[in-house]
Image (cartoon, rainbow, N blue to C red):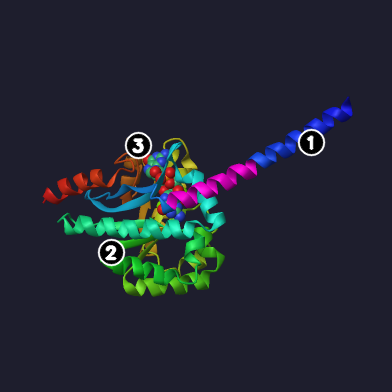
Amino acid sequence: KAKEAGRDGFQFYTAEMNTKVHERLALQEAMRHGIAHCEFYLLYQPQVDLQTGRIFAVEALVRWKHPTQGVISPVHFIPLAEETGLIVPLGDWVLNEACRQNKAWQDAGLSPVNVSVNVSGRQFHEKNWICRVTRALRESGMEARYLELELTESLLMRNVDQAIATMKELQALGVHFAIDDFGTGYSSLSALKNLPVARLKIDQSFIRNLARDENDRGIAAAVISLGQRLNMRVIAEGVETDEQFAFLHDNHCDEIQGYHFSRPIKSKAIEDLLRSQTAMP
Ligand code: C2E
Ligand code: MG
Ligand code: MG
Ligand code: MG
């Protein structure tokens, strides 16, 4: 009897493992198919200057409209895309589409904004990464100074000297860089001071509990001073409430991004926001 249960238990375990492997393979295959069949699209979230209230940039955030499962969040497919290398063709598409869209807004006479694109380590460390970026700029016709690439600390710290060299080459063309999710990785301050970074994005985990957590308030205020002392702009991510907004305002944070101003929205809705802003003096 016990032997039987053990055997059954074992079979159950392998069956479950098998399902996991199958699910991953299926997801990978569906993603490959989805890239070829244009199932991915971009939403854009405004980044706002805290002093003027104006949108100065939008962050491109990818979504997957799966034919049967509906809209899938990037948190569910970006990790697998990174592991399998599918992030390279997908990331290329995101970069090209974001540049194309931003140029289209400019051509329509809207006040020019930057477009921020998330870049994963796998993309950044591709041999021809610089070519891929220059091609997206050339093919879209968007000036390089309107492009900001968001990199994470862990990506940057993997090989700091290499990262600096790559960034400097792109910076020479006019491209800007931001450190995403700042404070959650392993940045060393000595590396940070040498990175050609225009902007620090305070991770939303420090913003979430600002009202309740004195330590988070300390960290947020310290990152704001740190960035400003290093001649970087500082943006807070995930700003949702009036209290968070007031704290960031009082502590001279440069910029904010979050549901308090706008969720990530479709390009048409961004166009309307930019149009009303263009009409302002
Ligand atoms: P991220 O780059 O840190 O983007 C910010 C995330 O926070 C976005 O989630 C955004 O929708 C969400 N967010 C913005 N404001 C608020 C707020 O006020 N409250 C809360 N709770 N959330 C807010 P999303 O779009 O689901 O993207 C998740 C992550 O997926 C991104 O984090 C980024 O790491 C990755 N990702 C998204 N698009 C791309 C892409 O095109 N390429 C790569 N490599 N990664 C991407
Ligand atoms: Mg980002
Ligand atoms: Mg972030
Ligand atoms: Mg993140």
Which of the pair 187/189 is nearer the observer? 187
- Looking at the image, the residue that sits furthest to the top is 1
Check disc 2 and give the amino acid type. Answer: Ser
Q: Residue at x 27, y 55 (%)?
A: 101
Looking at the picture, how far across and down is residue 128, in whole percent? Answer: 46, 71
The reply to whether callout 2 and callout 1 are in contact (CB within 8 Å) is no
Label 3 CB-ligand 1 distance < 8 A: no
Query: Is 40 above or below relative to 68?
Result: below
Beta carbon of the mark 1 residue lies under 8 A of ligand 1: no
Q: Which residues are magenta?
A: 20-35
Which amino acid type corresponds to the residue marked 1 in the rendered image?
A: Phe
Q: Which residue is mark 2?
A: 140
Q: Is residue 238 visible?
A: no
SS at circle 1: helix
- Pinpoint residue 149: horizontal percent, then vertical percent: 38, 61
The mark found on residue 252 in the picture is none
190 sits left or right of 172 in the view: right
Q: Is residue 35 above or below residue 121?
A: above
